[in-house]
Amino acid sequence: MALRIERQENVPLIGLIAAPVVALVFTLIVGAVMFVALGQDPLRAFGIYFIDPLLDPWTLQELVVKACPLMLIGIGLAFCYRANRWNIGAEGQYVAGAVFGSWLALATNGTDAGPWVLPAMLVLGVIGGALWGLIPAFLRVRFGSSEILTSLMLVYVAQLGLDYLVRGPWKDPQGFNFPQSVTFDDVAIMPLLMEEGRMHAGILIALVVVAGATFVLGRTLVGFSIELGGSAPRAAAFAGFDERRVTYGVFAVSGGLAGLAGIVEVAGTIGQIQPSISPGYGFTAIIAAMLGRLHPVGILISSLVLALTYIGGEAAQITMRMPFDVTRVFQGTLLIAILAADVLVRYRIRRVEGTSHA
Amino acid sequence: MLDAAILGAVLASIVAAATTLLLAALGELVAERAGTLNLSVEGMMIIGAAVGYAAAYGTGSLIVGTLAAVLAGTLLSLVFAGLAIWLAANQVAAGLATTILGLGLAGLIGAPFVGTTLEAAPALNIPYLSDLPLIGRVVFGQDAFAYASFVLLALVAYTLSRTRIGLVLRAVGESHVAAHALGHPVRKIRTLAVMFGGACAGLAGAQLSLAYTPFWASDMTAGRGWIALALVVFSAWKPLWLLAGAYLFGAVSILQLHVQGFGLGIPSQVLSALPYLATIAALVAISALKRGQGAPASLGVPFVPDR
């Protein structure tokens, strides 16, 4: 007796929605086992990790603050993944965007520059991220190099570049030798949406991107050519879509959005540039994209779910002295579960009698 | 400025750096020759480093630590195999998921050991040969991991090219449909190849935390798993080229450290970026020279029988 997987032609919509929910439940079960293994009462741990943050207005704002970069990066990645291009280096594009945008903030620091500074920083952030993302695209189109590995290597290069800047030329002279820049002027800081808390205008930008991407991917020829190029490259070629242009396009979009996320985070949440500006947003956004089924609205929801693992992880770190890696275990398990659940939706597993080859 | 003792020490540290890469890349080469692109090398390596360190610290035995690391790498590779081979999930996504899980689990396991140190795995001098000037220490005065990497390399090279098992494994990687038609259990063979890859990556992790830098730090792999993946491409899926590649990259990563020591006025971050830039350059050079055509034909394509 063996198991056989058969592809189902028409996947019911309910299945597509149920799969992420099943994956979440599975992740929670694994999480309970992990908490017990760490010697914690799983119910108390779940309360601190997943429930308490949702009951406090301050942490609710934090949830939005953390979901914002995930949304921006994840939607960009959806463009790439729909076109079957594997950009794994969003973390590096995020850093590049933060660096490009911060340059203007530091160049205009203390000069009484006008309110044009922040918008210009955001544009520079997009340009920086897009340029960094176009490197693996160029290497793939021109030389056929694996974009998976080159985009990833560029993450380390970007992080080292950031490290050099904040420890060298960009270091605050009055900063007691801490590796960080001066605090940005008010014109270079994202405005807050509420008096209390840290929720800034970045979320409005993210919502605009969600709406724009939903339209482009779902309703335009560009979206269609991306989709077709990813799922049926030969058909796309016959239809006259240029594969190279799609590659450059999706990498520019995903790099640009990652760069935007980087500068929004620096100008919105941190207020200065420092060696570490991301708790792995670029990698977590890969999960956000998958869990959200490469759909902008889905990514909006999944980003909030994943932001909760960051907030809960921080809470558990403080109240239960648990290592922050609990968050990564949750995120990894969630991605594994969503991949498995996808198969169970798209394929039927049947028991087959008497087959010898498994 | 460079006397024989310093040169010997530099060469010995190049061997240590290259051993990590060689072990991890060798396992991945076998998995890829069987047609499976396993992007979780970094994750399997870091879990090996964490579990190996924890077990060695707890038992006081480097051998127990090493075995535990190999086991941990193998177990994590089964997560990938279950997803990518048995559920036919996208291999890139499955590999990334496994890496993220591995990084998290390694952090949890290693957390109690931050700040501790171990006695590093000792050098095993081969009698008489290790007394040779210069070359003696470098080649015959290494720790067990370096010797293991040479033995594994010879074993893999021989098995792949000269034995029936190797032939079947390559057939599965070139055309899983044909291999399946001939009655070979494609998914079982791929699972075994991925498990071998996991064991090797776990061993590489143990080499990192028990010999190369005998302490635990949560980011101690620093992308070496990804460089190992690039090395497999660089080698055009041939074991002997892998040896050359691993030592080339070992040399780059050690020499940048020594150049930093001389203080030539080059920012240290530029030098630290060299191994990653060299990896990109190598990938581009290989693709430009069309050597990448050595890739197994069904690499990365999931096998679903009787589709």
Image (tube, rainbow, N blue to C red):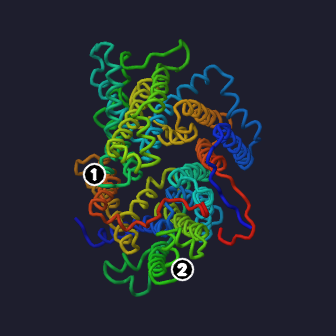
Q: CA distance from mark 2 to mark 1?
A: 38 Å
Residue A43 vertical position relative to residue B292 in the rendered view, above or below: above
Q: Is residue B301 visible?
A: yes
Q: Are marks 2 and 1 in contact (CB under 8 Å)?
A: no
Seen from this angle, which residue lies furthest front? A238
Q: To which residue does mark 2 refer?
A: B165
Between residue B162 and residue A93, name the one nearer to us.
B162
Mark 2, chain letter?
B
Between residue B283 and residue B296, name the one nearer to us.
B296
Q: Does residue B264 appear to the left or right of A119 in the view shown?
A: left
Q: Quadrant of the C terminus of chain A?
A: bottom right
Q: Position of residue A186 (x, y in %)?
A: 38, 16
- Answer with the quarter of the image where residue A354 lies: bottom right
Q: Position of residue B265 (x, y in %)?
A: 23, 47
Q: Which mark is residue A63?
A: none
Mark 1, chain letter?
A
The amino acid sitting under disc 2 is Ile
SS at badge 2:
helix
Q: Position of residue B88 (x, y in %)?
A: 58, 56
Same chain under badges 2 and 1? The reply is: no
Residue A125 vertical position relative to residue B148 in the rendered view, above or below: above
The amino acid sitting under disc 1 is Arg
Q: Position of residue A229 (x, y in %)?
A: 41, 45
Q: To which residue does mark 1 refer?
A: A142
